[in-house]
Image (spheres, rainbow, N blue to C red):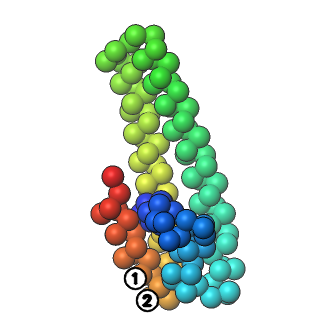
Amino acid sequence: ASFCTLRWVAARPHVASASAHDWLHKELRVTAEQHKALEPIEVRFAGKERALRGQMRAANRELAAALARGKGNSPEVAAAVEKIHHYMGELQKASLEHLFEMRTVLTPEQGDRLLQLAKKALEESP
């Protein structure tokens, strides 16, 4: 959900000049103290996200290689697709964990707003 929220924010023209992260913190009216507390949470998530996206890219290359070998709808293609789906699911889980970890630093009102933004992002994402 956090991932979707950040993607939704980044795609909006009026926030194109600012990073999605900065926009989200501004939208939630994050205080300097909260920003400091959120920083390690953001760093941990960024590392997980980077690793999972790398694994998805590798799985996509496996799928491309299987298709290039003319394997069609083979077990090799199916395995690559399953691997891609696995990493996509892991990224979604990590995003949700990140969302709820962020809420531990936010006020109840900010946390509710974060969930509203995540809900909207999920509803509007392709």
Tag 2: Cα neighbours inside 10 Å, few (<14), some, or many (≥20)?
few
Q: Quadrant of residue 85?
A: top left
Image point (44%, 77%), residue name: 114
Is residue 72 visible in the rendered image? The answer is yes
| Residue 62 on image: x %, y % | 50, 24
Image point (45%, 10%), residue name: 69
Task: Check the image and name the residue furthest to the top.
Answer: 70
Disc marking residue 112: 1
| Residue 51 on image: x %, y % | 60, 46
Q: Amino acid at mark 2?
A: Glu
Element under label 1? helix
Q: Nearer the viewer, residue 22 or 82?
A: 22
Give the CA distance from mark 1 to mark 2. 5 Å
Q: Amino acid at mark 1?
A: Asp
Tag 1: Cα neighbours inside 10 Å, few (<14), some, or many (≥20)?
some
Q: Does 66 appear above or below 39?
A: above
Image point (36%, 24%), residue name: 78
Q: Does 30 appear above or below 42?
A: below
Disc marking residue 109: 2
Q: CB under 8 Å between callouts 1 and 2?
A: yes
Task: Check the image and name the residue furthest to the front.
Answer: 13
Q: Nearer the viewer, residue 44 or 68?
A: 68
| Residue 68 on image: x %, y % | 46, 14
Q: Quadrant of residue 121?
A: bottom left
Element under label 2? helix
Q: Quadrant of residue 113?
A: bottom left
Image point (49%, 31%), residue name: 60
**Apparent side of residue 54 relative to residue 1 in the rendered image (left or right):** right
| Residue 3 on image: x %, y % | 48, 60
**Apparent side of residue 115 relative to residue 25 in the rendered image (left or right):** left
